[in-house]
Image (spheres, helix red, strand yellow):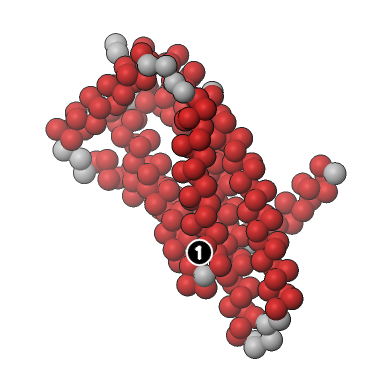
Amino acid sequence: MFSNAKGAFVKHIKSNSSIYFLLLLAFIIGVTIGAFTVNGLTVIQREELKNYFQGFLQLFDKQDINNAELFKVSLMENIKQIVVIWLLGVCIIGIPFIFVFVGIRGFLTGFGSGLLIQTFGIKGVIFIISSLLLKEIILLPCIIILGVNGIKFSLSIIKNKSIKRISKESLKSNLISYCFSTVFITMVMIAGIFMEVYISPVLIRVISPIFSN
């Protein structure tokens, strides 16, 4: 069963390699722009962000975390992103906006990571690896896959309309497949959210003392 799932996934990547490449390119461009944007911040802005981050860590270290509530909030935020990508995939004009969405995700990643590294150096790298990278290893690929599926579904609608032989049965079948794949990816993302809520806070508390030195 595992080998069949692996084979189907590899086949999916190969058949949609060009879309994966373009989406990854959009993400990388977003990361690059975000990282370069950090260089445009003034010394005062960087100092304010540094103080805010250190204050957040101090507050985070002293207060008890309601993991259940945090999980609920994080789940809702990620579901909103999933719904947005799904709706963009259903809309024919949504294809460019999927690229924009992934690019913005890359920008936020690049800006946050660039700011931490530039402000704290190796300490920032440690924070990124221990708290951000852990969940992004799961969540980011899921976002990319959702984007690919959305673009693929939109392109299928455009193709069928262009050759003027779209059938309700075919569209219904593709839509059901699109919905099922979205639900499956959502279930996988829950694992990333679980790591974000229950594992990352522990790691943040472990490394937070190095930012007070």
Label 1 Cα crowd, 10 Å radius (few <14 / some 14-19 / many 20+): many
Depth check, front residue: 125 or 66: 66
Q: Is residue 97 above or below residue 106?
A: below
Residue 120 location, quadrant: top left
Q: Residue at x 47, y 30 (%)?
A: 70
Q: Residue at x 42, y 59 (%)?
A: 100
Amino acid of disc 1: Leu
Q: Tell me: 197 left or right of 64.
A: right
Q: Quadrant of the C terminus?
A: top left
Depth check, front residue: 114 or 86: 86
Depth check, front residue: 128 or 196: 196
Q: Tell me: 4 left or right of 176.
A: right
Task: Give x and y (percent) for residue 27.
Answer: 46, 51
- The residue under label 1 is 88
Q: Residue at x 69, y 56 (%)?
A: 180
Task: Give x and y (percent) for residue 54.
Answer: 28, 21
Task: Give x and y (percent) for residue 56.
Answer: 31, 24
